[in-house]
Every structure is written in structure tokens, then in C-alpha cells.
Image: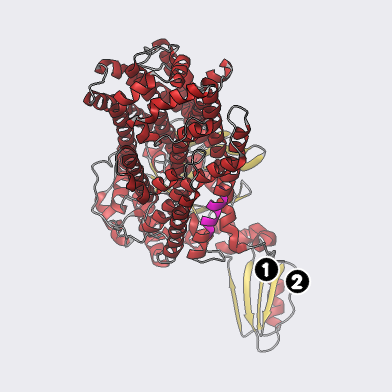
Amino acid sequence: MIQHFRSPQTVIARFVARRNLRSATLWALVFGGYLASKAIGFADTYPTLAGREKAVALFTNNVGIKMILGPIRHADSVGGYAAWNTFGAMVIIGSIWAMLLATKTFRGEEDAGRWELLASGQTTARRAAANALAGLVACLGLFYVVCAATFSLVGRTHSVNFNVGAALFFALSVVVGVGIFMVIGALASQILPTRSRAASVTATIFGVCFLLRGIADITSAHWLLNITPLGWVEKLQPLANPQPIWLLPIAVFILAAAGLTIFLAGQRDLGEGILADKDTAKPHIALLKSPLLATVRLTRANSLGWLASIFGTALLYGLLTKSAAQAFSQSASAAKLLNRLAHQSQLASITAFLGVVFFLQMFFIMAYAASSLAAIRRDEAEGYLDNFVVRPYSRLRWLWGRVCLSTTVIIIAGLLTTLGVWIGAASQHSSLPIHTLLLAGVNSLVPAVVVVGVGLLAFGLRPRLTSLLAYGVLAWSFLIEMVSSGISLNHWILDTSVLNHMSLAPAGGPKWSTNLALVVLAVVISLIGAMAFRSRDLQGE
Amino acid sequence: MPADNAIVVEKLSKLYGSFVALAPLDLEVKKGEILGYLGPNGAGKTTTIRLLLGLIKPSSGRVEIFGIDAQKDKIEAHRRLAYVPGEATFWPNLTGAETLHLLAKVHGSIDETYQAELIKRFDFEPSKKVRTYSKGNRQKINLIAALSTRADLLVMDEPTSGLDPIMEQAFRKSVLEAKDRGQTVFLSSHVLEEVETLCDRVGILRAGQLVELGTLAEMRHLSALTVVATFDGQPPKVDHLKGVSAVRIVGHQLVCQVQGSIEPLLKVITAAHPKTLLSREPSLEELFLSLYGDKEVQS
């Protein structure tokens, strides 16, 4: 007897939604927590209007902060300040998530050959693309609901006090910002033939949009805001001076990009992009003498991308040192942060600012470490590793090669952070001695080494949890640091964040004994993981 | 281990919890022999091969490859073998030539002249990127990479998966060349004709247990003789005779199988004055189906 299922035409949409609802919920909760920490923290730190006005005045003309977060509007209210402080970061993080999600859904699945199975159902290429977009929209819908609910809860807090309508508009502003880069990712996946290229192009577009928005904010070329999607998002001004009219160009852009995505899906062959790629090439075998060198070749673009981002960010921070440090030295919030992380609230402004810069760079370097562990696991799960270990090449040799490669990139990332900050700050005549920054750079590597250790332990004992645990260390530490910057947490909870054990070098001297203990711990758990990997079964997805 | 054995498997088993993927297996493969390894999906063929290669660890037992413990000294064991999986994941942005180069470097040695010959024989276009290859072309990479090593032992798991009939002939030629050079082949396959043509001995696996092992001649006792007779008129009734089964009457033609003595059947047929009479031994496919019975055939 043939069983007929309900709505087979929408199966792809439901499949895509089901696979991504969890991450949508998680990010929405993180954003809710972030807003809560900033809003409640600001209200607690500056309980009086006079205090708030003074705090806001510190940032009003600060070029560096304007470049990163945009200009302050109505930041004397708790809601306005919290929106200014969190909106930009939420849109940036959310957009990165959305870009990765879209390129994975549209191009990653196709690269892996799984899309073919879905597309061979009761559908056409265009309908399948529309389905996938619908699935992603469903994720964004849930993302909106959770954001709106948590933002409303934050707004109902006595000290914060903004209404539900404002919270809903704020959540909508975040969601449309994220949605823009979701459709750009989907569109790039139709145009380019591989996921990595689609992701690179989407990331480049994001970078250009961010730069245009930053230039518009710090120069007199404010008109630039009108031609960049991030400018439209900024002009929404949630919780400050809401301008819903700017939803119009955003909606037009999203609908046009989505429509083009669906149209182009029907214009190309499965497995190809609208822009054809070279199908043949002369052999280049210089980096194909061993699995390790092959990995260097296959991952060099990704590694260089990470390193360039880390260096670029460090350079940008360095360039902002002088202006940002001035505001930083007078900020009660910064003093609170320094007190918690460096146990000192009175520090030279430049030293304090650079301490926070290196602290922020730790997240980047940890993110690279987590991604490299996820790549190691992916090579096993997808069968690439089999090609080596069925030949006279040991698992441990392969694993240590990969770990050494990741560690090398981590060390280079630390050095580039040092170099970037030093060059940037020195150009503003506000740098610290290079050896002080170098120690801070070394200090910033330790959390990434811990991520590698935890990832390797999981890889050996529970390989399917590798990505979850490696990224989990990063996400948990991020969450704890974010929440604790506004709300007092129990020290047992604080201690679960690896970043809580780190010194805010150069604001405080590196805690070498703690660093050594963390590195030894990471090495020991790495060895346990490696030994377990040596003797366990290879496991697929 | 006797010096003339390429593979010795002793009480090798693999359990996943309470599920028996491979019941304790004893098996010897002689040097220079081609052993066919058959069984339906999930019978334990790939599990056996992954145990031979040390990709998974056994629940009990051991494997020796040319006297080397394949679990304890995988590197030395792998130096003597080459593996052809049914499907492999290659790096989509490398070309076929680059992939072959990398795999050769990892193995440590190849016969470059023979590799060039194999590329020609399999009509393989090495300058294309892997992501543009069809499944059959990706399988050619596996075959060329393994065969060109001239390894003492070739372990093959569904090696002709995705190949067209012409390439299957090229594959058979290559395997017979390997045998002529004294190489040993462990061939897991679903293509029974391929196994029948190439293999010296056949092992048949059922639900994780090796149920038969021997030459085709030795195994033919397992199944019935097929008899086909045509008549001028209606064929006689034979389904009541002892040992006769699978009786089919199509027009004036009778097809049936007989196990044991053929004499009673012959008496009935000759009494009905057949126009033609043909009998043949069971094919490997018939042997295989007889082992798995109606239930699994239907499934």
C-alpha cells in the first residue's frame, strides 16, 4: 500500500527549517542575554540621569567607537544606550551566522551531493530554491519571536523600561539586518560554483558594506548610509528614534535578492554556478607530497582569510587607540570591566584600552581554533581521512600534522595581533613598547590552546561532539563574559569561562602560572584525545 | 602462519552493542589467489574489510597480512596492500592527476609506466577537477591509484561500482594481470558474474557469518541442476517428483530444477518424447540465491 505524505512540495522548506531552528533559537537567546547585560548593567552603573549624560558625552565624538558601533542617538535613555551598544554587534554576528547558513544550505549541500536527492523530488530547481528560502525565513521567524520575547522581557525590567512595541521594532531591526546577508549568501550561492567562493564573496560584500557605513558615520559623507544596506539598518534607530520608513528599501532589497536567487536557480545546472568555473587545470604538485602539505594547500585560503581578519581587526583597534582610550579612561563601565578582569580600575587609558583589545582578539583566535578542530572532524566524517590511513600513514601522524598546522596558525594569529595593534597605535603615537605587546599577544593564545585541547579530547572520545564542544568553549566563555559585564555572577559560574582566568594584558601582567597550568591541561587532554583516536573506530557523520 | 598465505583471519568478530556485525570469522587467503567475498547488504563484507585495514578495531580475534599483525602494525601491513573502496571522497578542487599524485606519495611507491597505461585503459581524463567527475570516473581514480602501486595484496570493496560495461572489462583485465604477477586479490562484489569469472574461491557471508567458502566446483553441490526441455505438445507434470522444484511451463517448454538423483525426472521427460533437452550446472547467482532463499530474494 502506498502511503501519501502531506505536502511533498514543501518538504525542502520543512527540512531546511528543521535543521536550523536550533541555531536560530540559540543566537536569539544569546542576543537577548547580551541586551539584558548591557541594559541592566548601564542602568545599574549610571543610576542617575546626570551620570548617564556624562557617560554618553564621553562617546559622542569618539571616532573609533563611531566607526565600530555607529553614532550615539538618544543614548541618555537606558534603551537608547543599550540599542546603540548592542545593535551593531548583533547585526554583525547575526549576519555572519546568516551568511554561513545560507551558503551551507544553498551551496554546501549541493557540493556534498545531498541537494540532488532533495531536488529530484516533486519539485523544480526554482521551487526547491524557493522552498529553501522559505525554510530559512521560518528560521528567521523563530529568531524574531525569541528575540522579541527576550527584548520585551528586558524592556519590562524596572530599571530599563521600554515598551513592548519598541522591543518588537528592535527585534525586527535586528532580523532584517540579518536577513539582508542571508539573501546575499543565497544569491552568491547561485552565482558561484563552490561554497567557499560563495562564502568569501558574501563576506567581502559584508566587509565593504561595513566599511561604507563606518566611513559615513565618521566623515561628512553621511549620504553613503543611503546606498549601503547596513546604512539602512542603522537608520532604523530602534529604541532611540525609530524610523520604520527605512524598512522599505530593506524589504525591496530582500525581496529582489530572493527573487533573483529563485530565478537564477532555474538558469543554471545543478552543481554549477551562473559564473562558470575552470573544470580543468594543469597539475600543481608542489604541495602534494604528503597529507600535511596537502592540508596546507587545501586550507591555505581559509587560514589566510582568518589571519587577514585578525590582523585587520588588530590594526583597526590600533588606529583607534588614542581616541578610544581617552573615552575609555573616563567610562565607569570600562572601569567596572577592568576591575573584574584586571582587578584594577585605575589604569593608564591606553594600557586599559589595549588590554580590552587583546581580550577581544582572544575570541577571534579561539574561533579559528574551534573551526580548525571542526575541520579535522569533518575530514574523518566525510571520508577524506580514509584516503590516508588505508595507506602506510598512521592516524597519529595525520592528527599531529593537523594540530601542528592549527597551532602554527594560532601562533601567527597572536603575532599578527601584536603587530597590527603596534603598527596602528604607533601611527597614532600612542603605542606601548613592542615587547609588552608581544607578551600580551602570547597571553592571547592561551584560550585558543584550551579550545584545541577540549576539541581533541572530544575528537578522541566522542568524535561527533567535536564541533559542539570546541565551539561550546568559545560560546560559553563569550556568553559568560558578556553577561557578567553587566550582571554580577557567582564566581563558580565565572570560573567555567576560560577567559575569566586570563589576564587583561597589557592592562595587567600575564598570569604565567595560570597560563602554564591551562596549557599543561590542554596538552594532557590533547594527549588523552589522541591516544583514544589511535585505537577507536573511524566514524562517519 | 603458513608462508603461502597472504591473509589469515582468526576468530575475527565485530559487535556493535548486541548487534553482531561479524561473527567470529576464520579465513585464509593464499598468495596469488583471488578470493570473492559475497553477501547481501549488511551481511558484514565492508565490516570485514574495515577490520582487515584496521579502520575499526575487532571485538575479538586477529588479522595477519603477510604475517604482519594488521591491527598492531598497520603501517607495515598497509605497505603491502592497496585498497579500492566502493566510493571514496576526494578533494573537489584537486584534479585527477593531482589526486593520483598525492595518493601515490602517501603510499610511497608506484609503477609510473603502468599508471600511464591504466589511465589510458580506463579512458581517464586526469586534467579535470574531481568535482566534475561522474561517480564512475571517481571510481577510476581509486582503481588506478590502487592498481598502479603493484601492491602484493589488493583489497577491493565493490570496485566496479559506477563503471560502465567497457570499463568493467578493463577492470577484469587488470585484475587478471595482477594475478599473473602473483598479486593476491580480496574482492568483495555484488556483480556475481564478475566474481564467477575472476575468483579462484568464493566466500559467502550471511548475517555476519561466513556460511560457505570454497571453489565454485565445490559449491555447486549446494544448488539444483537446471533442466530445460521442449515438447511438441503439453509438457508432462513433474512437480510431484522427489527433488524437483521451481517448475515453470511456458508454452511447450518446461523449466525446472532438480536436486539429488536426476533419474526419476529423466524417465518422465523421455516418456513424453522431448524435442530438446538441456541441463546445466547452477550459476553463482543461482548458488547465491539458493543460500538466501525466497524471503531475501523477495526483499
Local packing at callout 2 (Cα closer than 10 Å; few below 14, some 14-19, many 20+) is few
Asked if residue A462 shows in the view, the reply is: no
- Taking B94 as reference, is A365 above or below it? above
Report the residue marked by disc 2. Answer: B241
Looking at the image, residue B190 lies above or below residue A363: below
Query: Which region of the structure is painted magenta?
Result: A131-139
Front in this rendered view, residue A415 or B45: A415
Which mark, residue B258? 1
Residue for point 30% across, 44% down: A221
- The answer to whether A422 appears left or right of A49 in the picture is left
- Say what amino acid the circle numbered 1 marks: Val
Q: Are marks 1 and 2 in contact (CB under 8 Å)?
A: yes
Label 1 element class: strand
Are tags 1 and 2 found on a single chain?
A: yes
Pointer 1 or 2: first along the chain: 2
List x then y, in percent, for residue A449.
41, 24
Amino acid type of the residue that numbered disc 2 sits on in the rendered structure: Leu
- Depth check, front residue: A286 or A437: A437
Tell me residue A78's x, y (percent).
Answer: 53, 30
Q: Chain of mark 1?
A: B
Left or right of B257? Residue A368 is: left
Residue positioned most to the right: B240
